[in-house]
Amino acid sequence: MADDVARLALSALVLAEFVFERRAQQNALKDLGGQLAQIDSRPPELAGQYRAVMQKQFDAWNLTGSEQDVVIGMLKGLPFREIAGLRQAREKTVRQQASSVYRKAGVSSRNELTAWFFEDMLDPPASGD
């Protein structure tokens, strides 16, 4: 009988922990949903401003229109084959354009190129935030 009471008590504790964790997860999901809603409601001009900054850098690097298209595809994470398909070009052509972009930008890889565009946005917040 004492074993049954102990098992019942242990089961009740496990169930209480499960309920507590479930509520914590639901609250975390609700908070995340609120954060995502804030991101989705950002002003449309923000994207235009970022695109203007990108264009300024494209101009400084003297990128052709095709090279700019390749960079945008790479920043979106598309593989060269998919970029080529979208541009109706050969994959080899896209790879050559990417190499030209790397040379003009002074980077050696897609990762370095992507980091160049996103590094400032990902700086840690100033202390006290």
Image (cartoon, rainbow, N blue to C red):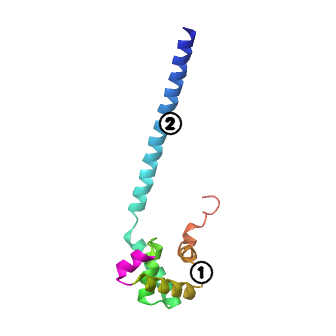
Q: Main secondary structure of the magenta part?
A: helix
Q: Which residue is mark 1?
A: 108
Residue underneath mark 2? 21
Quarter containing the C terminus: bottom right
What numbered label is drawn on residue 29?
Answer: none
Q: Which residues are magenta?
A: 80-89
Q: Secondary structure at mark 2?
A: helix
Residues 91 and 14: in front is 91
Which residue is located at x 55 percent, y 84 percent? 102
Question: What's under tag 1, amino acid-wise?
Answer: Ser
Q: Nearer the viewer, residue 53 or 75?
A: 75
Query: What is the x, y in percent for residue 54?
Result: 47, 80
Q: Earlier in the sequence, mark 2 or mark 1?
A: 2
Instruction: Using the image, determine if residue 28 lies above or below residue 46.
Output: above
Q: Residue at x 50, y 33 (%)?
A: 20
Residue 93 position (above or below residue 22): below
